[in-house]
């Protein structure tokens, strides 16, 4: 029987409960530190007893990626939820990793500012969003979440604190570590504090919505507004899955263009976007002041696999065609070349999609994305599918990533096996 090391882990640790699991792997212990010093203490004790640790924020996307090879201890950062400083005059935010993004945005809005990171599920935290490298509609104009980070503090797996960057927007010393941690799925270090550059809230915004039936019209619409001098903040696509049979009419999707700024300029740019969309073939275009109901949301999976597709914008028609052939619903930043695709859970009748069929669809999508400089990865999937397919696909930089992992976590104790190549 495994020895109980709970007494050595400190006062912030307890035995894990039934809900403390990661993609089906149950943890033995749960730690809930309240500050970076306690994070360091827990990680030092975990290292001394060779415990594998998985950091958890809001837990909204803990099922993404692969199950860990082991998860002895879940490090719950939800108590580290403080906004440390908001230097409104400098457009800089300092916050702990466990603070919820929605709480951050509410705080900033009171000062007429925002963090240009959106499209996250309810309950998502800053640390979890950075660890997954997941960006929403604002990435088109503001860049992905890694571009918003100007400083970062972490604790390494052996309990050693480290930091880079700072509170000055031009301080580029912090960019490398921030970018390295962004999208690393918690396999390199535990994020404790983040420093972001902010943007003013726009005085006005308008959503220009062009309904579409099927994917054929999407690329012309995206190209029409994407190449014009409108400077849209976002160009989003929401396209339902194709019908199961020919008797059902195609479901209506939409291309949505967001323009922001001062009221007069927004009105003029929205009118220009509407005319561009009409000229590109949209039969109906309307302008609304509030976001459409599914703005920034991923496609509905209904229990099927969820993929992330990346590509250069010229590949949009081919990627959408391959997604249609796979029966997928797609949504996301069409002009930025980042979409999420939901493969059908199975044929009509409720049976699960066989892994072989998912693997074939994934192979076809990967071939198309690779042709246009991108990738197709499985974000989440039912266990039988996840175990049967290559979740991450080919990774040219895998040797370099292994060397980075060896440098940061030679004992492979942080989220082991969760990331690409079993890192």
Image (cartoon, rainbow, N blue to C red):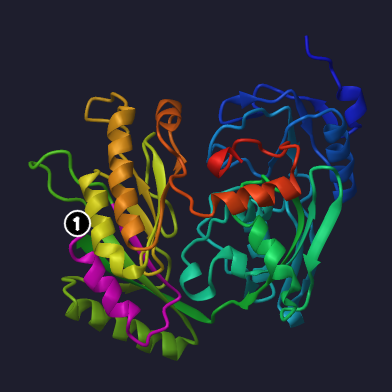
203 to 374, vertically: above or below: below
Judge left or right: residue 423 versus residue 17. left
Mark 1 neighbour class, 10 Å CA radius: few under 14, some 14 to 19, many 20 or more: some
Q: Residue at x 90, y 48 (%)?
A: 37
Q: Residue furthest left?
A: 247
- Res 189 visible: no
**Image quadrant containing the N terminus:** top right
Whether the magenta-drawn stretch holds residue 233 is answered as yes
x, y percent for residue 227: 32, 82
Q: Which residue is mark 1?
A: 214
x, y percent for residue 157: 79, 43
**Image quadrant containing the C terminus:** top right
Camera-nearest residue between 208 and 255: 255
Which residues fall within the magenta stretch? 214-239
- Res 423 visible: yes
Camera-nearest residue between 191 and 136: 191
Whether the magenta-drawn stretch holds residue 302 is answered as no
Judge left or right: residue 341 versus residue 379. left
Q: Residue at x 23, y 25 (%)?
A: 349
77 to 107, vertically: above or below: above
In the picture, residue 84 is in which quadrant? Answer: bottom right
x, y percent for residue 418: 59, 38
Camera-nearest residue between 175 and 235: 175
Q: Secondary structure at mark 1?
A: loop
379 to 83, vertically: above or below: above
């Amino acid at each position: 029987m495994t020895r109980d090391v709970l007494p050595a882990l400190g006062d912030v640790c307890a035995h894990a409960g039934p809900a403390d699991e990661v993609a089906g792997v149950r943890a033995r212990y749960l730690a809930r530190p309240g500050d970076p010093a306690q994070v360091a203490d827990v990680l030092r004790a975990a290292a001394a007893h060779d415990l594998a640790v998985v950091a958890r924020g809001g837990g909204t996307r803990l099922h993404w990626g692969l199950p860990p090879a082991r998860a002895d201890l879940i490090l719950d950062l939800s108590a580290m939820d403080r906004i440390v400083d908001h230097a409104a005059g400098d457009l800089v935010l300092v916050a702990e990793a466990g603070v919820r993004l929605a709480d951050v945005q509410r705080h900033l809005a009171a000062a007429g500012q925002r963090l240009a990171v959106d499209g996250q599920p309810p309950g998502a935290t800053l640390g979890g969003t950075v660890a997954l490298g997941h960006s929403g509609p604002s990435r088109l104009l503001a860049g992905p979440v890694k571009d918003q980070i100007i400083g970062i503090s972490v604790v390494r797996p052996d309990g050693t604190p480290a930091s880079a960057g700072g509170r000055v927007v031009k301080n580029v010393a912090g960019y490398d570590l921030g970018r390295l941690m962004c999208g690393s799925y918690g396999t390199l270090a535990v994020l404790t504090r983040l420093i972001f550059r902010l943007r003013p809230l726009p005085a006005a915004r308008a959503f220009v919505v062009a309904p579409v039936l099927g994917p054929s019209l999407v690329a012309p619409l995206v190209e029409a507004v994407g190449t014009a001098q409108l400077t849209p903040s976002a160009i989003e696509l929401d396209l339902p899955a194709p019908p199961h049979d020919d008797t059902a009419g195609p479901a209506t999707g939409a291309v949505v263009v967001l323009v922001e700024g001062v009221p007069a300029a927004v009105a003029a740019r929205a009118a220009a976007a509407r005319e561009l969309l009409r000229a590109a073939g949209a039969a109906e275009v309307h302008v609304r002041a509030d976001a459409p109901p599914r703005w920034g949301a991923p496609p509905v999976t209904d229990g099927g696999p969820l993929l992330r597709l990346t590509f250069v914008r010229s590949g949009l028609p081919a990627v959408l065609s391959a997604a249609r052939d796979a029966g997928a619903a797609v949504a996301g930043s069409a002009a930025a070349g980042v979409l999420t695709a939901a493969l059908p859970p199975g044929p009509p009748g409720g049976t699960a999609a066989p892994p072989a069929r998912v693997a074939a669809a994934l192979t076809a999508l990967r071939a198309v994305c690779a042709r246009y400089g991108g990738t197709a990865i499985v974000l989440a999937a039912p266990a039988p599918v996840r175990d049967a397919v290559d979740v991450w696909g080919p990774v040219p930089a895998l040797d370099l990533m292994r060397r980075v992992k060896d440098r940061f976590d030679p004992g492979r104790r942080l989220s082991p096996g969760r990331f690409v190549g079993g890192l």
